[in-house]
Amino acid sequence: MKAGTNRMGKYILNRLLWMIFVLVGTAIVIFTIMYFIPKDIAKVLLGSSATQAELASLRERLGLNDPYIVQLLRYLKNVFTKFDLGKSYIYNVPVMQELLSRIPRTFFIGCSVILFDSLLGIPLGLMAGLNQNKWQDALCMVLALIFVSVPNFWLALQLVDIFAVKLHWLPAFGIGGIKYYIMPVFAAFVSGVATNARQMRSSLLDVTRADYITSARAKGVSERNVVLKHMLPNALIPVVTGLGVGLGKSIAGSVIIETVFTIPGVGMYLLTGINNADYPVVQGSIIILSFFSALVMLLLDIVYAQVDPRIKAQYSGRMHGVTK
């Protein structure tokens, strides 16, 4: 048991190190892209009427006159030792402070999307896989095809038109109570339901043909137990991977949904920074989104290690039925 715990600790530590490398690499890439964009930030901030003296003063104050490597190292030091993402050029507010107030909204939408993806997509795929080539299978796959074909921004606009403009059931934009999140979450999770349903069906059909399923049925195990104890746990392994990736995409790809519904989350903050050439906002938003995506993948690796019996055996000290 102790050896297995040590191995799991090393596994988690290894993933944490990779997470750090990913974040540092992301910071370097986004800073480099922003640095080499052919745009004078001083002119953007002060306007075309600014004098050369004013422009030079602002460049000096922002540290824009320093060489690339000096600016990069200073930025990395501030981000990873002081957790300082800089101040917004436009609003002169610390980027970290603004992001901390916006992260819960983006994270809530992302987690809600994955929850509904799981609650709807997995049962649909299970029903389709257990009734291969029957009407249930055809119905589920038609629904999945329709869901995956609908662009989320188009669906979001249709929801606003129907439920906010015409029926007046839900608010069209902004934040407040839970009713403000109903349409954004619905618009975001529809395509994920289709993806999970198709993945669950495919995985279940692969498991159905496995030798251990045939052996369990030959031993007289009830069909209910075959499905719940043998087929479902193994079929869920690739689905868990898809859910983790989906959560990362929902959080990192929140720009469209937050823009349509005017939700002041990280995605909308990022878009505002891009439109205003507010580089600290863009850099900070991308680093935070990358952090949450990397964190989700870390949690996914841990869950995957617990769900997959092959990986779990390595960290419990057993392999191929032999105790080490």
Image (tube, rainbow, N blue to C red):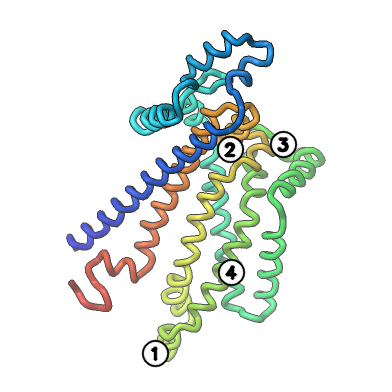
Helix, strand or loop at label 4? It is helix
Instruction: Tell me the distance, in whole angstroms, between the alpha carbons under discs 1 and 2.
Output: 54 Å
Residues under numbered marks 4 and 1 in contact, where contact means CB atoms less than 8 Å apart: no
Instruction: Tell me the distance, in whole angstroms, between the alpha carbons under discs 1 and 3.
Output: 58 Å
Instruction: Tell me the distance, in whole angstroms, between the alpha carbons under discs 2 and 4.
Output: 31 Å
Q: Is residue 106 depicted above or below 272 in this figure?
A: below
Q: Earlier in the sequence, mark 3 or mark 2?
A: 3
Helix, strand or loop at label 3? It is loop
Q: Earlier in the sequence, mark 1 or mark 2?
A: 1
Q: Nearer the viewer, residue 96 or 233?
A: 96
Quadrant of the rendered structure where residue 40 is?
Answer: top right
Residues under numbered marks 2 and 4 in contact, where contact means CB atoms less than 8 Å apart: no
Q: Earlier in the sequence, mark 3 or mark 4?
A: 4
Q: Is residue 223 visible?
A: yes
Q: Residue at x 45, y 83 (%)?
A: 210
Q: Which mark is residue 267?
A: 2
| Residue 238 coordinates in the image, percent (x, y) | 48, 66
Per the image, the residue denoted by label 4 is 125
